[in-house]
Amino acid sequence: AQSVTQLGSHVSVSEGALVLLRCNYSSSVPPYLFWYVQYPNQGLQLLLKYTSAATLVKGINGFEAEFKKSETSFHLTKPSAHMRDAAEYFCAVSSTGANSKLTFGKGITLSVRP
Amino acid sequence: EAEVAQSPRYKITEKSQAVAFWCDPISGHATLYWYRQILGQGPELLVQFQDESVVDDSQLPKDRFSAERLKGVDSTLKIQPAELGDSAMYLCASSLARTSGSEYFGPGTRLTVT
């Protein structure tokens, strides 16, 4: 079985500050890991994904995440927050191979203060 | 850019009534997914189709939920009868590949059961 844990439900940062959203995973097999963003009343958009290549993954909108097997973590970061980054962020895990299924965390709401 | 279409965007229904949601995936995408997202939680896979065949419906409450994709293109998710606990966002996604991280999500249908 696979799962992800996103501690806390809300993070608030000032515009221009570092964004750090935490995600820890549990998986009995080598995982694929993902971060998705969801803006109000919209579907999910893939930010980035780890599929066992480079452990530091760069995504869209200036976000990146680092896969740390020893810590079972896949935290999402962005050096400088922008107002448009305010949204809900979901970490997800899946197994490799065909018919793999995404298992999502509960999500974290990011607020950006002017 | 091609998008996944869903309708209606919002639906209010009384408990014990029947309700149906429609999804039109991106043209050429053989894999189609229905997810349920309860407020404050991450999406949960209800059913996955490969063309017209169900690949995974292990989390679909089959006593009241049904899904079909008769011609392997668009899909309908039905709930009968609706219960208060069914209030959620229902997301459709499609992908070319059968592996995670390649899904494109639609905007969702927000269902409120009164």
Image (tube, rainbow, N blue to C red):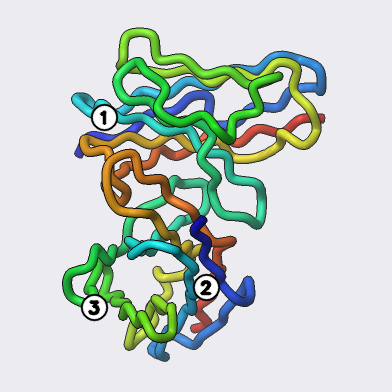
Please provide percent x and percent y for residue B68. Answer: 46, 14
Answer yes or no: do the residues labelled 3 and 2 have beta carbons within 8 Å? no
What residue did someone put label 2 on? A110
**Looking at numbered disc 2 in the image, what kind of residue is underneath it?**
Leu
Amino acid carrying mark 1 in the image: Ile
Q: In this rendering, would B30 be left or right of B62?
A: left
Give me the chain letter of mark 2: A
Give the residue number, with chain letter if any, for mark 1: B26
Residue lying at 52% horizontally and 61% vertically, measured from the top left: A3
Identity, as a three-letter code, of the amino acid under mark 3 = Thr
The secondary structure type at the circle numbered 3 is: loop
Q: Which residue is mark 3?
A: A55
For the residues labelled 3 and 1, the Cα–Cα distance comes to 31 Å
| Above or below, B99 relative to A52 | above
Query: Which residue appears at 30% of the width and 30% of the height?
Result: B31
Q: CA distance from mark 3 to mark 2?
A: 24 Å
Instruction: Give the mark, 3 or 2, whose residue is nearer the N terminus.
Output: 3
When the figure is inspected, residue B37 is found, relative to residue B82, above or below; the finding is: below
The spot of residue B110 in percent (x, y) is 60, 36
* Quarter holding residue B63: top right
Determine whether label 2 and label 1 are within 8 Å by CB. no
Query: What chain does mark 1 sit on?
Result: B
Q: Nearer the viewer, mark 2 or mark 1?
A: 1
- Give the position of the C terminus of chain B as an image quadrant: top right
Distance, label 2 to label 1, CA atoms, is: 30 Å
Q: Callout 2: helix, strand or loop?
A: strand
Vertical side of B47 occupied by A11: above or below: below
Residues flagged by tags 3 and 2 on a common chain: yes
Image coordinates of residue B27 in percent, x first then y, are: 21, 25
Residue B72: image location, x then y, percent: 31, 15
Report the residue that reaches farthest toward the top.
B70
